[in-house]
């Protein structure tokens, strides 16, 4: 049986979902979270982005056109980038452990995590997932994936703003120093 890149991509993303679901029972109780409107908007934009990225139903018009040639080299590179990005996001999720939440939240007994992947970037889950989305876009090679990546990045940017505000309030001394040392998403750049 031949190796199927699309199946490998799907299995990689499924591994992320399984790990996220398995870790949910260990999350601490939320003390404060982002409002419902902000959460609904974030979810809508991110789900639309992931649908564009992964669904063949959007292979219509310009969305279905290729931005890369249909050749093995970019696809194999894309698989490697997807695996690396998902792996980085999983590492970050495990580092947060009970402090993680699907919405911008301050947890009971919240700790400021600055080790592991949080030494490299303040938002390594988003950095890893964006890298993985870029890799998936390279495998698919269609403009719908670029549109999805842009929407996912926009949704993450919205959530990052909320999280940054909450962390500044929760850790008024330590978070500003952490922000000076560590970039938001891309080490040494942004």
Image (cartoon, grey):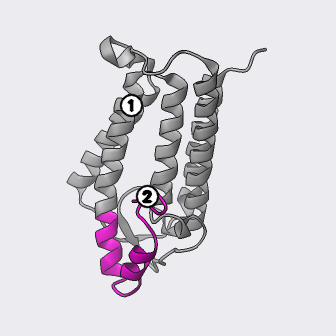
**Front-most of residues 4 and 67:** 67
- Magenta stretch: give its range: 162-190
As drawn, the label of residue 185 is: 2
Which comes sooner in the sequence, label 2 or label 1?
1
The reply to whether the magenta stretch includes residue 133 is: no
Do we see residue 52 in this rendering? yes
Residue that protrudes farthest toward the top in the picture: 61
Q: Secondary structure at mark 1?
A: helix
**Front-most of residues 10 and 143:** 143
Determine which residue is flagged by label 1: 146
Tell me: 68 left or right of 169: right
Asked if 136 appears above or below 182 in the picture, the reply is above
Asked if 95 appears above or below 103 in the picture, the reply is below
Residue that protrudes farthest toward the left in the picture: 37
x and y percent of residue 110 in the render? 45, 77
As drawn, the label of residue 7 is: none
Residue that protrudes farthest toward the front in the picture: 188
Do we see residue 22 in this rendering? no
């Amino acid at each position: 049986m031949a190796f199927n890149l699309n199946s490998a991509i799907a299995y990689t993303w499924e591994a992320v979902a399984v790990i996220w679901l398995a870790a949910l029972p260990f999350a601490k109780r939320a003390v404060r979270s982002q409002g419902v409107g902000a959460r609904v908007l974030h979810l809508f934009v991110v789900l639309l982005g992931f649908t564009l990225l992964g669904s063949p139903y959007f292979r219509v018009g310009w969305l279905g056109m290729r931005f890369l040639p249909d050749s093995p080299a970019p696809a194999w590179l894309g698989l490697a980038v997807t695996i690396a990005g998902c792996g980085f996001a999983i590492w970050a999720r495990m580092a947060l452990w009970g402090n993680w939440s699907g919405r911008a939240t301050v947890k009971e007994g919240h700790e400021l995590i600055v080790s592991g992947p949080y030494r490299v970037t303040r938002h390594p889950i988003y950095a890893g997932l964006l890298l993985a989305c870029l890799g998936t876009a390279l495998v698919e090679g269609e403009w719908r994936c670029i549109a999805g990546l842009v929407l996912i990045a926009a949704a993450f940017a919205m959530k990052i703003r909320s999280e940054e505000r909450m962390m500044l309030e929760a850790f008024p001394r330590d978070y500003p120093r952490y922000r000076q040392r560590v970039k938001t998403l891309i080490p040494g750049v942004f």
